[in-house]
Image (cartoon, rainbow, N blue to C red):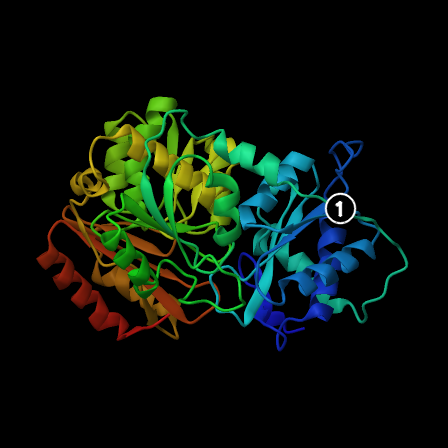
Amino acid sequence: MDPKIFKAYDIRGVYPDQLDEDAAWKIGNATAAFLRSLLRGYDRGLANRQSLCVGHDMRQHSKSLAEALIKGMNAVGANVIDIGMVDTPQVYFAINHLGTCGGVQVTASHNPAQYNGFKISGLEAKPVGQDTGLKEIKHISTALLHTLGTMHGSVEKRDLTEAYKEHVLKFLDPKIKKLKIVIDASNGMAGKVVPLIFDGLGMDIIKLNFEHKGVFKHDPNPLIESSLLQLKEMVKKRKANAGICFDGDADRLMMVDEKGQTISCDLLTALMVPYFLKKAPNSAILYDLRSSWVVREEILKYGGVPRRERVGHAFMKKTLRAAHAIFGGELSGHFYYRDNFYADSGMITLVHMINILSQSQQPVSELIKPLRRYFASGETNFAVEDKEEMMKELRRRFSQGETDDLDGITVQFKDWWFNCRPSNTEPLLRLNVEAKTKELLEKQFAEIKNLLGEPVEH
């Protein structure tokens, strides 16, 4: 097993070179041992509290990896509830619905077809990352010399489709318009889950890339603009109200308007602000620090409490829970909900978008238009060997601005700002710049680029 498969928030690598069934068994064994060790102080008497649930995505090797993972869990005496081929948010639902001590989704999310991996969650679907157990799981699993065990837990197969559907649709307003929406499933889990939840609701859903053949027609990452080309073309051709593109495991999405224009996810967060604050006045709303100034401005405008947080689902979920925030949005397309166990969900985000479009008399482009009041660079990656030294140089060069170190370095001026943060796993710095005018954005981006070098594709 290649130790490099252990990332900051999950486990991911190329199958079978870096990650195979042998590795899956060891990771399952270590995960069960670790999660069950955390039960001290909790009610062990609950029927499923010492069990784990396991799901997997549609990749060709996901089922066999899930089976090996489960055998590894059984070998330390853990009982497993196998919920089958599901989207990642259904695992978060299952952990809470079934009351297990945690669960694992076998998926490589938005990575190409040759990749696979594991997203691990603990009690109440709290994320397990480097600082919350993944380091320990890595230590236990890499120390195992064989895939043998003397204890034998049980395996129960459960289909949670109806319960999950009921959970997602409880957020749907009873009176929705007959919208025409193009949905690109990216040959991922949305291809299975969208029909199960949304068919029969009276909407006109035009389906793209819903097939599961072990290959992706385009990169299953909706943040890559080329992944949206087919969606945009179909939205315009069919005169749809909007288009949605999901990632591989359907926990993230991107949206395009009726004209086929991409809507960045911070603007989607801003769009949802008045909708949520009407439901829960004065609530906290969370956003990641790469988000446009417009998000904070909209939260304050509608009487909410803005909470700015580090990038990454582990930080977002922790702060959402601590602040009891009604929802949170991340530039990556993750949207988190208090009433969804403080977890993210692509399907619930789709429901809320349907509600917002149904309540409005305006097309999506007009709803978004007043939110497009700044100019943003988008996230750009730069290969930098000495990341710390470069961050110090940025701090020195832009010392006249208001600086904070929440995640990397953020420097704000009255008419522009930037954030530059280091990658957790690679020699990369990630840069976001926003300004009040396009000319100022280009000028300041060019100045920082002169320091960081040429951007790299990522």
Instruction: Return the residue at label 1.
Output: 36
Q: Residue at x 55, y 50 (%)?
A: 88
In the picture, the quarter occupied by the C terminus is: bottom left
The one nearer the camera, 264 or 300, is: 264
> Is residue 53 placed above or below 385 in the rendered structure?
above
The one nearer the camera, 182 or 200, is: 200
For the question of whether residue 40 can be seen, the reply is yes
- Count residues near mark 1 (Cα–Cα under 10 Å), then give few for <14, some for 14-19, many for 20+: many
Given the current orientation, which residue lies at the most extreme bottom position?
17
Q: Quadrant of residue 16?
A: bottom right
> Is residue 401 placed above or below 68 in the rendered structure?
above
> Is residue 456 placed above or below 250 in the rendered structure?
below
The one nearer the camera, 419 or 239, is: 239
In the picture, the quarter occupied by the N terminus is: bottom right
Q: Secondary structure at mark 1?
A: helix
Q: Quadrant of residue 22?
A: bottom right
Rendering coords of residue 397 (x, y %): 21, 63
For the question of whether residue 126 can be seen, the reply is no
Rendering coords of residue 221 (x, y %): 41, 61
Q: Residue at x 31, y 31 (%)?
A: 358
Rendering coords of residue 348 (x, y %): 45, 39
Q: Residue at x 17, y 67 (%)?
A: 446
Q: Quadrant of residue 185?
A: bottom left
Residue type, mark 1 in image? Arg
User: Is 48 on the left or on the right of 362, as rendered?
Assistant: right
Rendering coords of residue 150 (x, y %): 90, 59
User: Is 129 on the left or on the right of 398, as rendered?
Assistant: right
Q: Residue at x 26, y 75 (%)?
A: 454
Give the tally of numbered discs. Answer: 1
